[in-house]
Amino acid sequence: MPISNVLIVDDSKTELMVLSDLLSRNGYSVRTADCADEAFKRLAEQKPDLILMDVVMPGQNGFQLTRAISRDPQFAGVPIIMCTSKNQETDRVWGMRQGARDYITKPVDGRELLSKISALG
């Protein structure tokens, strides 16, 4: 299934703006959420084709949110790419164990992110 609708979950307004701009310029429809509660609201409104997930957020972190989404039968098929400043190998492994399909570290290289997205689509 080609990816066209992307949900970005990140508590940083700057990251949301940068990633939204990058994806919009490349033809993706983008919606954003700045915390787990807002992410669940966005999921209820429209099922995305892909979720870009930050890890460090207030309340429920990205690892917990990824686990919750990937274990929900309604959203289990939606790929999640962790997009975080946590750059240790243990973080990457843990993110993948929670259900993420891929892992990219900040600052995000636009070409690398677009390549990872097209590999999923």
Image (spheres, grey):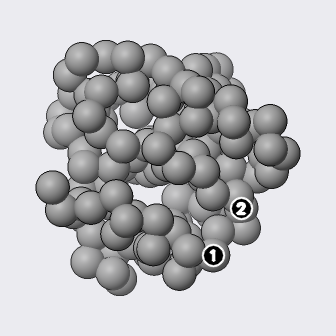
Determine which of the numbered discs, if any, sits on residue 19 in the image.
none
Helix, strand, or loop for circle 1? loop
Instruction: Say left or right for 105 vs 2.
Output: right
Using residue 88 as the reference point, say whether residue 50 is left or right of it: left
Quarter of the image containing the N terminus?
bottom left
Residue 78 drawn above or below residue 103: above
Which label number is shown at residue 109?
1
Above or below, 99 relative to 28: above
Q: Is residue 34 visible?
A: no
Residue linked to disc 2:
106
Residue 97, picture quadrant:
top right
Question: Residue shown at 64%/68% (left/top)?
Answer: 108
Q: Nearer the viewer, residue 105 or 37?
A: 105
**Crowding at label 2, few (<14), some or many (≥20) Cα neighbours within 10 Å?**
few
Q: Are marks 1 and 2 in contact (CB under 8 Å)?
A: no
Q: Is residue 82 visible?
A: yes
For mark 1, does the 10 Å Cα neighbourhood hold few (<14), some (14 to 19), or many (20 or more) residues? few
Residue under the point 69% across and 36% down: 93
Left or right: 66 as drawn, with respect to 88: left
In the displayed structure image, the side of residue 46 where residue 36 appears, left or right: right
Q: Label 2 sits on what residue type? A: Lys
- Who's the residue at 20% across and 22% down the image? 74
At a point 27% along the width and 69% down the height, the residue shown is 28
Residue 10 point in image, percent of width and height: 57, 46
Quadrant in the rendering for residue 109: bottom right
